[in-house]
Amino acid sequence: MIPSSETVGTAGPGRPRDPGVNRAILKAALRQLAEDGYSRMSMDAVASEAGVTKPTVYRRWSSKADLATAALAELQGAEPIPSTGSAPSDLKRILGTLQKTLFRPNGMAIIGAVMVEERHTPELITLFRERVVHPRRLMLREVLESAEAEGALRAGADLDAAVNMLIGSFYAHYLTGDKMPRTWARRIVDTVWKGIAKPGRRRAATRR
Amino acid sequence: MIPSSETVGTAGPGRPRDPGVNRAILKAALRQLAEDGYSRMSMDAVASEAGVTKPTVYRRWSSKADLATAALAELQGAEPIPSTGSAPSDLKRILGTLQKTLFRPNGMAIIGAVMVEERHTPELITLFRERVVHPRRLMLREVLESAEAEGALRAGADLDAAVNMLIGSFYAHYLTGDKMPRTWARRIVDTVWKGIAKPGRRRAATRR
DNA sequence: GTTTATTTACGATACGGTATAGTAATTCTA
DNA sequence: TAGAATTACTATACCGTATCGTAAATAAAC
């Protein structure tokens, strides 16, 4: 467990820190990390974009890697999505928000940014996995497991494969460079669901 | 259409170029591109690793971006895989080689490298799509279409979704950081196939 | 056919310009 | 007055270019 490396401002004497400065720095760092990647993200540019100067940044985070991981840690995992009672419908909603997240500007670029740094700055992808990848997978996994518990899935359905297919199809599509159709989430879930659900069963009506 | 930017050595008088030098430079460039990413790849380091000096590199490629795209172009698209007659079996073989390609050292890192440069050096991802992404997708697509022509798939099967799921599941798995099981290709194809094949039909025996 | 000039490739080295991470030295402010 | 913020700085790295000398091949002169 890596302790937070952010230098805490003690509440002692002297001028107190402006909490807005922290937020501005992290926001600028995250934006540059996503748009330019780690190695092009510069402490000068982050400071300037945040409206402060470099030593102000270094007072809070001791290095560039430190700041970058702190910025990544700001990424919140997927917000919980209320269940609709129907597994395919739940999956579509989860993937719908995933689609919005990934395909807004730089939603996908941050994945490239942490991937390419796996060798030089492995703490980035480690944290990204903890904060973003695993929570999202868990949401899908839970929907699938509860469907399985209700007997909706065929025996031996490969839930792990299903999770990877649901999420990975977005990545694969992104790499084509084509525009993502708005019905994408529905199409993916429909196809995956046919692969894991009990056959011969009328498919539940799906809301939308 | 971008013409090859490599400076061709005319066969006129003068000392001929050492063809081994070209290969060594491209190999070093590709390695650094994959391991370190584009912005950390340096012309100094490439030259040194290739056993030449910088002007020798610049005599052949006019810029760093030029060299990087030339190195990427060396990536050959998937080699053709002979058909076995059974679509699921063909898919498994294609995914099997994909698995070997992606999960050998730096097989995945190059994807991150071109992704993160989409803004600064978009020609990298453009070329990568042409040379690597599209050929691979086409192979899968062709297997699926011929299965469809033989009436093996259910009506309205979403082939595009299937292709994305087949490939994307690898990417999604990679992002978890877990080891890839050796049976992965089989599991993915099995699940996808159930989602697109005609139901009620005894599944063809799959070789292995 | 031998010799000489010409042309190109390459190594080694250096340099200009720019950019970056991180660090004093100094001023400001609660 | 103590800590926060700024300005100025150091050290380093990199891209791209230039120079100088040498190796290897062709073309021309004799």
Image: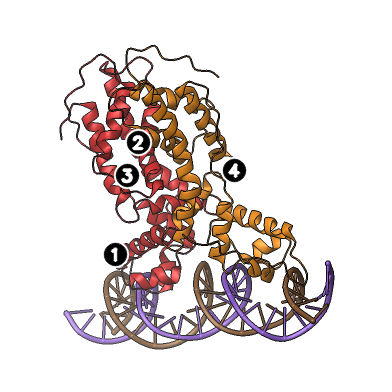
Chain colours: A orange, B red, C purple, D brown
Q: As shown in the figure, which amino acid type bears the numbered disc 3?
A: Gly
Quadrant position of the C terminus of chain B in the picture:
top left
Name the residue at 21% across, 21% down.
B203
Q: Nearer the viewer, mark 2 or mark 1?
A: 2
User: How many residues crowd around disc 3 within 10 Å: few (fewer than 14), some, or many (20 or more)?
Assistant: some
Please tell me in which quadrant of the rendered image residue B183 appears: top left
Q: As shown in the figure, which amino acid type bears the numbered disc 2?
A: Asp
User: How many residues crowd around disc 1 within 10 Å: few (fewer than 14), some, or many (20 or more)?
Assistant: few
- Helix, strand or loop for disc 2: helix
Chain identifier of the residue bearing label 4 in the image: A
Please tell me in which quadrant of the rendered image residue A50 appears: bottom right
Q: Which residue is mark 4?
A: A105
Expressed as whole percent of the image width and height from the top left, the position of residue B139 reads: 30, 34
Q: Separation of disc 2 and disc 4 at Cα? A: 29 Å
Report whether B170 appears left or right of C3: right
Q: As shown in the figure, which amino acid type bears the numbered disc 1?
A: Pro
Q: Which residue is mark 2?
A: A160
Labels 4 and 1 touching (C-beta < 8 A): no
Q: Which residue is mark 3?
A: B77
Discs 3 and 4 share one subunit: no
Q: Separation of disc 3 and disc 1 at Cα? A: 23 Å
Q: Separation of disc 4 and disc 1 at Cα? A: 43 Å
Q: Separation of disc 2 and disc 3 at Cα? A: 29 Å
